[in-house]
Amino acid sequence: MNEARKITIKLIKSGIGRMKNHKLCIKGLGFKKLNQTICVEDTPSNRGMINKISDMLEITDN
């Protein structure tokens, strides 16, 4: 059985004053607060959202 790879990401910058697309990426990844750390599956859609707001995130590969 294939186990899905996970990426650990932390939101280190606020979405205030950002474009609507960036705010939607923050919400789509599942962030609720600043400095929150979450694990998401390594899928092409998640990778795209992470790449779009990469300056706001701290990324750790598991």
Image (cartoon, helix red, strand yellow):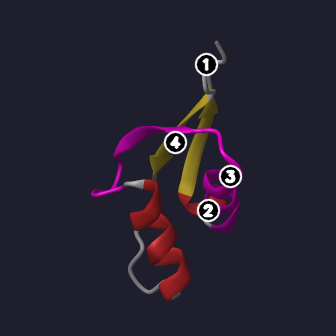
The amino acid pointed to by label 3 is Arg
Say which quarter of the image contains residue 34.
bottom left
**Distance from label 1 to label 3 (Cα)?**
17 Å
Residue beneath label 2, please? 49
Name the residue tied to disc 1: 3
Residue identified by numbered label 3: 47
Tell us which disc is closer to us: 4 or 2: 2
Q: Is residue 14 magenta?
A: no
**Residue 59 x %, y %:** 60, 41
Which residues are the magenta region? 31-52
Residue 21 lies, with reference to residue 9, above or below; the image says below
Q: Distance between the residues labelled 2 and 1?
A: 22 Å
Q: Is residue 32 magenta?
A: yes
Q: State the SS at label 4.
A: strand
What residue is at 67 percent from the left and 67 percent from the top?
52
Residue 2 place in picture, x, y as percent: 66, 18
Read off the residue under disc 4: 9
Q: Which amino acid does label 4 sit on?
A: Ile
